[in-house]
């Protein structure tokens, strides 16, 4: 089993392979406190005004949707609307 640190994950850009769209970088993880496994990654949603003024949503991407973790990117396969949540 290979390991990766959160600080390493945060440096990687997340790309949706369904439409080749760059979603951003990982900012947080959702952990299962019972077994310590990662359940999802958190990526900030699109900005409110053309990418400016912050964001009021985030992508909560289940670990099962991650298809590949490379040296610089994380490839995910998602329907973006389904995993975009208001914060």
Image (spheres, helix red, strand yellow):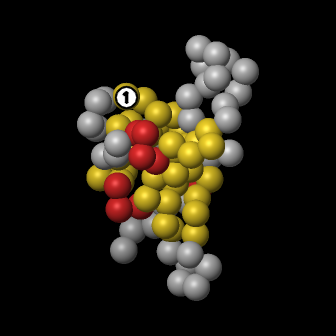
Mark 1 is surrounded, within 10 Å at the Cα level, by few (under 14), some (14 to 19) or many (20 or more) other residues, namely few
Percent position of residue 43, x then y: 55, 43
Q: Is residue 25 visible to the viewer in this orientation of the structure?
A: yes
Left or right of 23: which side holds 56? right
Residue that extends furthest to the right in the rendered view of this protein: 53
Q: Residue at x 41, y 39 (%)?
A: 80
- Number of marks in the rendered image: 1
Q: Tell me the SS state at disc 1.
A: strand
Left or right of 17: which side holds 14? right
Residue situated in front as seen by the camera: 84 or 67 = 84
Percent position of residue 23, x then y: 47, 34
Q: Residue at x 58, y 63 (%)?
A: 30
Residue situated in front as seen by the camera: 11 or 33 = 33
Residue situated in front as seen by the camera: 25 or 81 = 81
Quarter that holds the C terminus: top right
Q: Residue at x 31, y 29 (%)?
A: 20
Residue that extends furthest to the bottom in the rendered view of this protein: 34
Tell me the residue that label 1 is attached to: 21
Establish if 15 lies above or below 69. above
Percent position of residue 53, x then y: 73, 21
Q: Residue at x 29, y 30 (%)?
A: 19
Establish if 64 lies above or below 21. below
Which quadrant of the view contains residue 47? top right
Q: Is residue 10 visible to the viewer in this orientation of the structure?
A: no
């Amino acid at each position: 089993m290979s390991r990766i640190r959160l600080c390493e994950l945060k440096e990687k850009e997340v790309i949706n392979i369904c439409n080749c769209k760059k979603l951003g970088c990982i900012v947080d993880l959702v952990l299962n406190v019972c077994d310590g496994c990662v359940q999802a990654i958190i990526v900030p949603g699109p900005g409110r005004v053309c990418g400016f003024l912050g964001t009021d949503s985030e992508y909560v991407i289940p670990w099962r949707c991650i298809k590949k973790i490379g040296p610089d990117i994380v490839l995910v396969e998602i329907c973006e609307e389904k995993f975009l949540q208001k914060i």
